[in-house]
Image (tube, rainbow, N blue to C red):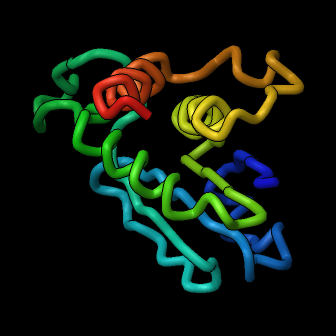
Amino acid sequence: MLAIETMSKHEVERGIVKDVSRAALISITCPGEQVQIFNNFSATLNLVFDDCKEKLQLLNGQGSTVLFSESQAKTVLHYLNAIRDMELLIIHCHAGISRSKAVALFAHIYYGIDVLDSNSFRNINTHVFSILLDAAKSQKL
């Protein structure tokens, strides 16, 4: 059965997981942040969006916040379907708290895996989670 873990970007960069030969990665970064390439994983999905729950203008006036989109949610659904035979799915964002936890909670539901520690999902990005649920419902998965 697939194991699902969330980590911070720093933990993944340090190589905290030693055997990634049967591991998949979802890497979440912020717009403008360099996308780190992790070639050692069997499969990698890179996503770029801000850790926001609603559309806001940035205070410095340099543009709009990039929200997690329906298109990205569909990409996640296809990726989760493609990696279902892996042993491990690692999902990381900057801190490993909000965006990655939202995707991880959805992945648990998608694969029918029980959530053993619901407290670890109390700070999820609710926008990301709801967009993923809506995409799954629209694709009847």
Residue 52 in view here: no
Q: Is residue 27 left or right of residue 24?
A: left
Q: Is residue 84 above or below residue 115?
A: below
Residue 108 is situated, as x and y percent measured from the top left of the image, at 68, 35
At x 70%, y 70%, the residue is: 23
Residue 71 is situated, as x and y percent measured from the top left of the image, at 23, 42
At x 75%, y 48%, the residue is: 5
Residue 5 in view here: yes
Q: Is residue 2 above or below residue 131?
A: below
Q: Quadrant of the N terminus?
A: bottom right
At x 53%, y 57%, the residue is: 26
- The answer to which quarter of the image holds residue 10 is bottom right
Q: Is residue 78 left or right of residue 15?
A: left
Q: Is residue 70 above or below residue 34?
A: above
Q: How many numbered circles are shown? A: 0
The one of 18 and 78 positioned closer to us in this rendering: 78
Residue 63 is situated, as x and y percent measured from the top left of the image, at 11, 35
Q: Quadrant of the C terminus?
A: top left
Pick out the residue farthest to the front: 140
At x 55%, y 85%, the residue is: 39
Residue 60 is situated, as x and y percent measured from the top left of the image, at 18, 30
